[in-house]
Image: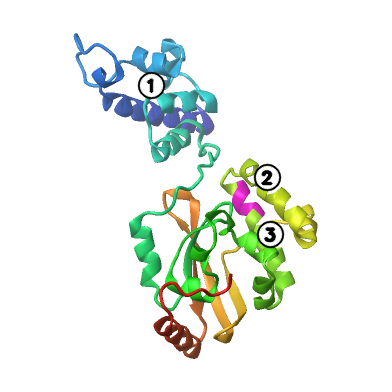
């Protein structure tokens, strides 16, 4: 047996073990199957095949490691039949095909209270949660006072691209706007593609192209970029010139969300933000 064939067989065997384990965890009665004359717990192989709309023989071969590499379509149907979570589905694909499944974008419905508490723990560091389409869905007080008062904006306007290309005050506040805009557009394109949200951003892209010739020109260049870390320099109406270092983090288990934290680069900048927070009511507005 060649090394490649041996590796393939080992992968098929691991797939079979995983399928058997997931199958054994399902309740036949809850899924409408009779519970009599069952020697083991869980669904029978033919019941999984029926739910997945595939051949019982083919499914049996997969569990026995004799079926060869299944297609992505078959694995998707089996994942549905076994009621796998997104994480379990990814594991199924890794076992069956040696790669994760294609990304399926899910629009964000907000953040958990735990994530909001994480944002609020950064007292003088503006922090926010954005989606793959760069909608801001959560933020802390420092972000509202230093970056933008997202709470004062309609939900549909809490988008970083809309603010960057549609607000003259935001544009004037950003030093080296052209370079920042180029970076943001490239990172936005990459984020949307990575999250499988290319079709979801079509309407926003059309709107921004009509709104801003600069955006239309940058978008037509098809450049990609990363927004992992860098420096943001602002001319704030109250604080004056301020410099922030930013870092971006993925939210584990939520590929649709990203965490961005902006840290003041000097102790003096941090104290100025702290004083602004102390002097401002919660409802205070910053850069609309």
Q: What's the distance in space between the residues labelled 2 and 1, CA to CA? A: 42 Å
**SS at mark 3 in the image:** helix
Q: Give the residue number, with chain letter if any, for mark 3.
A: 185
The image shows residue 239, relative to residue 112, as above or below, that is below
Front residue (pair 3, 231): 231
Q: Give the residue number, with chain letter if any, for mark 1.
A: 63
Residue at figure coordinates x 21%, y 13% from the top left: 35
Residue at figure coordinates x 70%, y 66% from the top left: 181
Residue 190 part of the magenta-drawn span = yes
Q: What is the span of residues highlighted in magenta in the rendered image?
A: 189-193
Residue 24 at x, y = what percent?
Answer: 27, 24
Sequence-wise first label, 2 or 3: 3
Front residue (pair 136, 34): 136
Mark 2 Cα shell of 10 Å, populated few (<14), some (14-19), many (≥20): few
Q: Quadrant of residue 286?
A: bottom right
Given this view, does label 2 or label 3 mark the residue nearer the observer? Answer: 2
Number of marks in the rendered image? 3
The C terminus - image quarter: bottom right
Q: Are marks 2 and 3 in contact (CB under 8 Å)?
A: no
- In the rendered structure, find residue 202 and report the number of the disc placed on it: 2
Sequence-wise first label, 1 or 3: 1
């Amino acid at each position: 047996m060649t090394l490649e064939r041996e590796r393939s067989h080992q992968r098929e065997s691991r797939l079979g073990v995983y399928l058997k384990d997931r199958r054994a965890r399902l309740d036949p009665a809850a899924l409408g199957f009779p519970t009599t004359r069952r020697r083991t717990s869980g669904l029978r192989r033919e019941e999984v095949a029926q739910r997945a709309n595939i051949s019982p023989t083919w499914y049996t071969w997969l569990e026995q490691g004799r079926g060869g590499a299944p297609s992505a379509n078959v694995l998707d149907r089996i994942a549905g039949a076994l009621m796998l979570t997104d994480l379990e589905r990814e594991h199924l694909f890794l076992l069956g095909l040696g790669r994760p499944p294609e990304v399926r974008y899910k629009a964000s419905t907000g953040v958990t209270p735990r994530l909001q508490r994480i944002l609020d723990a950064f007292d003088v560091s503006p922090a926010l949660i954005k989606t793959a389409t760069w909608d801001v869905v959560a933020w802390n007080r420092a972000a509202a006072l230093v970056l933008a008062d997202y709470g004062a904006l309609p939900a549909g306007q809490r988008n970083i691209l809309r603010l960057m290309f549609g607000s003259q005050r935001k544009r004037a506040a950003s030093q080296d706007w052209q370079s920042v805009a180029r970076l943001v557009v490239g990172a936005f394109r990459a984020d949307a593609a990575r999250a499988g949200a290319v079709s979801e951003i079509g309407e926003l892209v059309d709107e921004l192209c009509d709104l801003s010739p600069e955006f239309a020109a940058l978008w037509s260049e098809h450049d990609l970029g990363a927004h992992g870390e860098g420096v943001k320099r602002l001319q704030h109406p109250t604080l004056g010139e301020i410099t922030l270092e930013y870092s971006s983090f993925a939210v584990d288990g939520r590929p649709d969300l990203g965490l961005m934290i902006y840290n003041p680069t000097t102790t003096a900048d941090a104290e100025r933000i702290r004083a602004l927070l102390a002097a401002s009511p919660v409802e205070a507005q910053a850069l609309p």
